[in-house]
Amino acid sequence: MEDKGEIRYENCGVDEEMFPCMGKCCFKDGTAFKVSYAKICPYCRISTSLPSGSSLKTATIFECGRLGYGTRVTE
């Protein structure tokens, strides 16, 4: 739905099981050394922790401000 040039995300069709949906919520921007994500939806928030543990893995946290979903991905 479009209103004055702005896209409105009233019914994105993403349920909690498929969150975060690549292509609707965010997209993966991977390079050879680091994987990063960029948000598409204005309601999504993405944060990344500093590397920790003996394997120096990072955790990426995805949150949907509109629907209240949240998930953590360790890479």
Image (cartoon, rainbow, N blue to C red):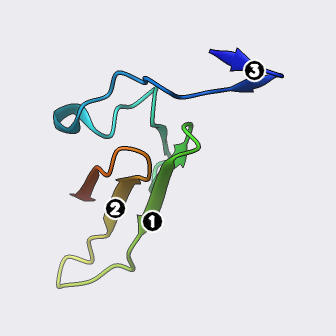
Calculate the distance from the C-alpha at mark 1 to the C-alpha at mark 2. Answer: 5 Å
Q: Position of residue 53 (x, y in %)?
A: 19, 84
Q: Check residue 47 in the rendering and tell me which mark sits there, or answer none.
A: 1
The local secondary structure at tag 2 comes to strand
Calculate the distance from the C-alpha at mark 1 to the C-alpha at mark 3. Answer: 29 Å
Q: Position of residue 9 (x, y in %)?
A: 54, 28
Check the image and report above or below for 56 versus 15.
Answer: below
In this rendering, the label closer to the viewer, 2 or 3: 3
Residue 5, located in which quarter of the rendered image? top right
Circles 2 and 3 in contact, beta carbons < 8 Å: no
Circles 1 and 2 in contact, beta carbons < 8 Å: yes
Left or right of 46 in this view: 67: left
Tell which residue pokes out farthest to the top in this image. 1
Upstream in the sequence, badge 1 or badge 3?
3
Q: Position of residue 11 (x, y in %)?
A: 43, 23
Q: Check residue 3 in the rendering and tell me which mark sits there, or answer none.
A: 3
Residue at left 27%, top 77%?
56
The local secondary structure at tag 1 comes to strand
Q: How many marks?
A: 3
Residue 18, located in which quarter of the rendered image? top left
Q: Check residue 61 in the rendering and tell me which mark sits there, or answer none.
A: 2
